[in-house]
Amino acid sequence: MTTSTTTSPRFGAILARHRRLLALGALSLLLHLMALAWVDLRIDAPPVLAGRQDLAVRLVQPAPPAPAAAAAPAAMLPDTAAPLAPADEVRPAPPPQTASTAATPAQGGEPVQMPSRYRVSMPPSAVLTYEVSDGSGVTGDASLDWSTDGVQYRLAMDGILGRIDSEGGTDDAGIAPLRASYRIGSGSASVAFERERRAIVFESVGRSAQDTPGSQDGASLLMQLAGIGLADPDQLQDAVDVYVGRADGAAVERYQVLGREQLETPLGGMETLHLARTGSVRTEIWLAPGQGWLPVQLRTTAQDGSLRTQTIKQIRRTP
């Protein structure tokens, strides 16, 4: 009995203490569960942004671009402006300018047809003196002074074709001028034949033209025609084309063979071959086979019909 009475109160105290622990544990568990539930709610339902009722996402079509604000006639190109070329189009560079439209294909036209080469024999040195006449009679003298050693030459001409000094040499195409000076009034115009560069340079105006073997200046042309006759008269059958560099440009000049004529001169009658070139001024040349094909008479006819003629009156052979 004594044992039972002592044990019962102790057991009750222990049980009471455990009930308090169980209650505290249950309360702690409940609080943890509530905390977890609250956290879960915070995750599932994002907070409402301040000042916004709802946050919705809508796909909106972009508004069409505004019409270029009455495109201020922005920098309008002039009507004459050329359209832009396609990216793969290559435009040729503008052709260089030259002295004569007939002189070189670099000017944009068709390439000039260069004359054929002729066989040429160098005429021997000679000094020719002429009398000059027009419709009113004899008006003065003219001269042609040709000096050569068979390779190099010098030529001075003063007459109805102008005052020209020429110097140069020879090549496979005959007489080959290197420089010519055209005296015009009180001035002069120089022309250089740059054979290696194949260019005729008009130094007075700073331009150039294509060169070709056989090209001549306005004075050497006469001796080249004489050399063609000396080498082979059969070359003078129909026409002779010569590329000539003058003070203002270069072009192929055609001298038409008009036929044989008996020419009366202060030195007596001479058999000649008559050639002529048409143009703004008609030019006629009489070559004398019996005088080494030298030019024994020249004539020019202006557009108004006025004539000027120079006819041989003396031929002096020089060593």
Image (cartoon, helix red, strand yellow):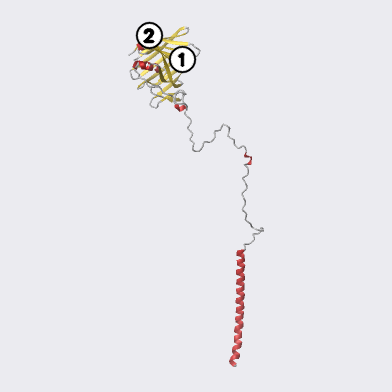
The residue that mark 1 highlights is 282
Assess disc 2: are there few (<14), some (14-19) or many (≥20) residues with their C-alpha within 10 Å of its C-alpha. Answer: some
- Residue 16 is left or right of residue 308, and the answer is right
Q: Nearer the viewer, residue 142 or 279?
A: 279
- Helix, strand or loop at label 2? It is strand
Q: Quadrant of residue 211?
A: top left
Residue, far front:
238
Which numbered disc covers residue 270? 2
Residue 239, given in percent of the width and then of the height, sits at 41, 17
Quadrant containing the N terminus is bottom right
What amino acid is labelled 2 in the image? Answer: Met
Q: Nearer the viewer, residue 319 or 23?
A: 23
- Residue at x-position 60% and y-position 81%: 18
- Residue 83 is left or right of residue 115, and the answer is right
- Residue at x-position 62% and y-position 75%: 27
- Residue at x-position 60% and y-position 74%: 29
What amino acid is labelled 1 in the image? Answer: Arg
> Vertical placement of 82 versus 165: above or below?
below
Residue 2, given in percent of the width and then of the height, sits at 59, 93
Q: Nearer the viewer, residue 24 or 283?
A: 283
> Vertical placement of 17 versus 225: above or below?
below
Q: How many marks?
A: 2
Quadrant containing the C terminus is top left
Which numbered disc covers residue 255? none
Residue 152, given in percent of the width and then of the height, sits at 35, 19
Assess disc 1: are there few (<14), some (14-19) or many (≥20) residues with their C-alpha within 10 Å of its C-alpha. Answer: some
- Mark 2 and mark 1 lie on one chain; the one further toward the N terminus is 2
Q: Nearer the viewer, residue 165 or 90?
A: 90
Q: Quadrant of residue 286?
A: top left
What separation in Å lies between label 2 and label 1 (alpha carbons)?
23 Å
